Image (cartoon, grey):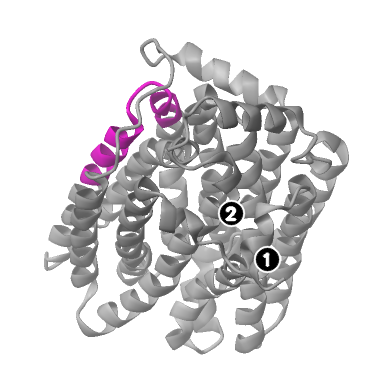
Amino acid sequence: MRKKFTVDLSPLRTNRNFRYLWSAGFVSTLGSMITYVALPFQIKIITHSYIAVGAMGAIEIIPLVVFGLYGGVLADKVDRKKLILATELAALFISLGLYLNSQLEHPHLIALYLAAGLFSSVDGLQRPSQNAILPRIVAHADQPSATALMSLRWQFGAITGPAIAGVLIATAGISVGYLVDVVSYLLSILLLWRLASVPPTQENDTPSFASLVEGVKYATSRKDLLGTYLVDLAAMFFAMPNALFPFWAEQLHATWSLGLFYAAGTIGSIAVTLTSGWIRTYRFHGRAVMWAALGWGVAISLAGVTTSLPLTILFLGIAGASDMVSALSRSAIWNQSIPDEYRGRLAGIELLSYSVGPLGGQMRAGTMAAATNLRTSVVSGGLLCIGFVSFAAKFLPEFRKYDLETNPFAVRERKIRESDGLNQ
C-alpha cells in the first residue's frame, strides 16, 4: 500500500537516456522559472500597469500557436534530440539578450515583450519534441511513472526558481537572474548532447501543411482526446490568475508573499506527484481529468472570495493539486494511446491546449481586473471554468468514460510497444 502512494523512481534508475533528458530539463527549468518571475516583475517596475503585465500573454499566444503546431510537424519529421538541442541554444541567446538589456540605464520595454514572444516561439518549437520523445525512450508500462517524474522535475524548478528569483531580485538585481538562466541553458545543452538520437520511425516527407492537417483530423476524430484538449483549455483560460499575483499580494498588504503566490500551486501539485504511485495502475483517466478540472475551478473561486492570505495560499495549493491530477491523467491518455507517427503533431496540439489557455488566461484576468476589480476577475473565472467543464463532460461521453484497459487505441499501442522493440 505504501508503495502505491510513492512516486515511482524506476525510470530514472534503469533508463540512461531518460536520466539525461530529465537532468537537462531539471537544470534549464530552474533557470527559466527565475526568468518567469523576473520578466513580468521588470515590466511592472517600468509600467505599474495591470494591462502591461497581462499583455505578455497576448504577445506570447500567436507565436506559441504558430510555432507549436509547426514544432509538432517537425517532431514527426526530424531527429527529436537535435530539435531540442537547437531550441535550447536559441533560448540561451534570448536570455543573454535580456541580461544585456537589463544592464542599460533605462531598459527597453519593447525588448522585454520581444523576448517574451521569442521565448514563446522557441517553446512552441521545442515542447512537441520534448513530449513526443518520451514514448520512444521509455517503455509503454512506464509512461505514467516517467510523466510523474517529468512533472516532479518541473515542480521543483517552479518552487525553487521563484524563491531564488525573489532573493536575487531583492539582493542582486534582475540582471543576475537573467544571467543565471543563461548558465542553466549551457548546462542543459551539455547534458542533452549525451542523449541518444531519436530519428523518425518511418520514412517521412518534407514537413508540410498537409501533414499538420492530417494530425488535426486524427485528433478531432477521437473524442476522448478532444475532451482532454477542451477541458484543459477552458480551465486555464477562464481560471488562470497568475498575471494578477503581483497586484494580489499588494492588495493583501503582503508584498513579501509574492513568491508564495507563484509557488502555492506547485506545492499542491508536487504533493500529488510525490504520492503518484497509483497512476501506474489507474484506468479511468477521463473521469479523473473531469473531476480535477472542476476542483481547479472551485479552488480558484474560493481563493478569490477570501481576504485571508493563508486561505488564499491554501486554495491556490488545492488548485495546483487538482491541476496535477488532471495533468497526470491527460498525459497517460496521450502517451499510451497515440501512435508514434502522429505523436509530434498531436504533441503540438497538446501544447496549445495546456499553454495557450494560461497565456490567454493572463490576458483575460488582467483585462477583467482592469475593467472591474481583482476579486471579480478571479471569482468569475473560476465559475466560468466550472460551467464549461460540466458542459464538455456531458457532451463528450467517450472522454468521460475513457478506460485504459478497454480503449481500442490504448490497447493497440500497448501491443505495438510490446512487440516492435521501440522502447530502449
Drawn side of residue 422 relative to residue 368, left or right = left
Front residue (pair 419, 122): 419
> Residue 395, percent across and down?
86, 36
Q: Choose the circle earlier in sequence order: 2 or 1.
A: 1
Q: Is residue 373 visible?
A: no
Q: Residue at x 86, y 37 (%)?
A: 397
Q: Is residue 262 magenta?
A: no
Residue 4 badge:
1
The answer to whether mark 2 and mark 1 are in CB contact below 8 A is no
Q: Write down the region rendered in magenta.
A: 70-90
Q: Secondary structure at mark 2?
A: helix
Q: Quadrant of the N terminus?
A: bottom right
In the image, residue 265 sits, relative to residue 94, either above or below, namely: below
Q: Quadrant of residue 168?
A: bottom left
Q: Quadrant of the C terminus?
A: top left
Q: CA distance from mark 2 to mark 1?
A: 40 Å
Residue 327 badge:
none
In the image, residue 400 sits, relative to residue 160, either above or below, namely: above
Nearest-to-viewer mark from 2 and 1: 1
Q: Residue at x 62, y 51 (%)?
A: 237
> Residue 197, percent across and down?
30, 33
Q: Is residue 304 visible?
A: yes
Front residue (pair 68, 7): 7
Magenta residues, dominant SS class: helix
Drawn side of residue 37 relative to residue 184, left or right = right
Drawn side of residue 285 relative to residue 69, left or right = right
Q: Quadrant of residue 405?
A: top right
Drawn side of residue 306 relative to residue 126, left or right = right
Q: Is residue 75 magenta?
A: yes
The amino acid marked with disc number 1 is Lys
Residue 364 badge:
2
The amino acid marked with disc number 2 is Arg
